[in-house]
Structures are given as structure tokens and as C-alpha cells.
Amino acid sequence: GKEIFVSNEVGWGVIPEQTPTREYMEKLAKINRELAQKADEVYLMVAGIANRIK
């Protein structure tokens, strides 16, 4: 069946100095990359508009 994952894009902002926040951003970015690599389709939503990037 079809699975849909929804996540935040964390790589476009300022990288915080606080270690826990930075670690969270790095882990989420890694998970997003791994899911995107395995997915047949990937969309980036910007201002309510779906942009297909894969």
C-alpha cells in the first residue's frame, strides 16, 4: 500500500549553537534524506503548493 510521511524541512534556517537542538536537526535531516532516497515520489510543500522534487 501507499505510505505518506510528513516532516519539517530543517536545513534552511540558522543552525543553533545549542547542542540538543542542533542534534535534533541533524537527526531529522538524516531521516528525511533516507526516506526520500527510498521513496518513489517526494514533494516539498511551500505556501500550500506541492512541488514534486522526485
Image: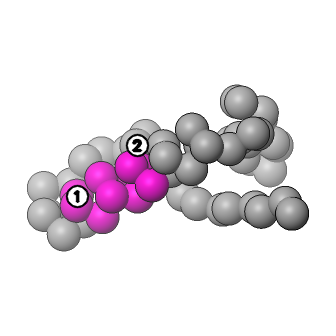
Residue depicted at 68% across the width and 62% down the height: 5
Q: Nearer the viewer, residue 40 or 17?
A: 40
Give the quadrant of the C terminus.
Answer: top right
Tag 2: amino acid: Gly
Residue located farthest toward the front when viewing the structure as drawn = 1
- The disc label shown at residue 44, or none: none
Q: Earlier in the sequence, mark 1 or mark 2?
A: 2
Q: Secondary structure at mark 2?
A: loop
Q: Secondary structure at mark 1?
A: helix
**Residue 15 vertical placement versus 41 (above, below):** below
Residue 13 appears in the figure: yes
* Residue 43 on image: x %, y %: 73, 42
> In the rendered image, which residue does mark 1 sit on?
22
Tag 1: amino acid: Arg
Give the quadrant of the N terminus.
Answer: bottom right
Q: Alpha-carbon neighbours of circle 1 within 10 Å: few (<14), some, or many (≥20)? A: some
Distance Cα–Cα, label 1 vs label 2:
11 Å
Which quadrant of the structure image shows residue 41? Answer: top right
The answer to whether residue 30 is magenta is yes
The answer to whether residue 50 is magenta is no
Viewed as shown, does residue 37 lie left or right of 15? right
Q: Are marks 1 and 2 in contact (CB under 8 Å)?
A: no
**Residue 18 vertical placement versus 48 (above, below):** below
Residue 10 appears in the figure: no
* Residue 35 on image: x %, y %: 56, 50
How was this image coloured? one colour
Residue depicted at 30% across the width and 64% down the height: 24
Highlighted magenta segment, given as a residue range: 22-31
Residue depicted at 40% across the width and 58% down the height: 28
> In the rendered image, which residue does mark 2 sit on?
11
